[in-house]
Image (tube, helix red, strand yellow):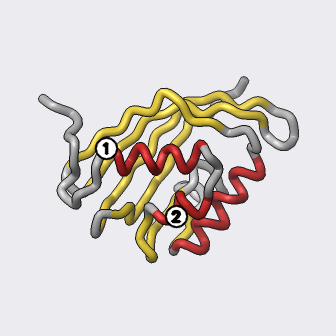
Amino acid sequence: MTLSVERAKDNVTMEFMASFADAWNRHDADAVVAHMTEDCIYEASSGPEPWGARCIGREATRAAVAATFAAVPDMAFSEVRTYLYGERGFAEWRVTGTRADGRRLDAYGCDAFEFRDGLIAAKRSYIKNRTA
């Protein structure tokens, strides 16, 4: 069984997804949301609700992503593995960095994606809850 394809049903390619990951590593919130639909849903891996913090729309998502970059100024994603399935996708990754309060961040996580019109319509992020 093949787990990944080169192109999702909605013409989202592995190159597009690599560009999205690169925007995160460059800390470019504008480039991050340029990969997303105007009415996108972004669910961060942390927040007060069971789903974390949810943003709807590019402006709210941009603000949340920028706040994440400010909270972890040296945040970097590595070991990214992306899988595309029709109108959905999945990415596994490792994130490292130093939080603004000095605590180290080093954890594995994943994103579940929904695509529409060649863009990311939803990004739901999950991260390992480490006690160390």
User: Amino acid under label 2?
Assistant: Val
Alpha-carbon neighbours of circle 2 within 10 Å: few (<14), some, or many (≥20)? many
Q: Measured from the top left, where is residue 43 in percent x and y?
A: 52, 58
Which residue in the structure is indicated by mark 1?
14
Q: Measured from the top left, where is residue 26 in percent x and y?
A: 62, 46
In the image, residue 45 sits, relative to residue 32, either above or below, namely: above
State how far apart marks 2 and 1 are (Cα).
17 Å
Q: Residue at x 44, y 56 (%)?
A: 123
Q: Residue at x 65, y 28 (%)?
A: 106
- Which one is nearer the viewer's eye here, 39 or 14? 14
| Residue 108: quadrant of the picture | top right
Q: Looking at this rendering, what residue extends furthest in the top direction?
A: 132
Lower sequence index among marks 2 and 1: 1
User: Amino acid under label 1?
Assistant: Met
Labels 2 & 1 near each other (Cβ < 8 A): no
Task: Give the side of residue 46 with respect to residue 114, left or right.
Answer: right
In the image, residue 20 sits, relative to residue 57, either above or below, namely: above
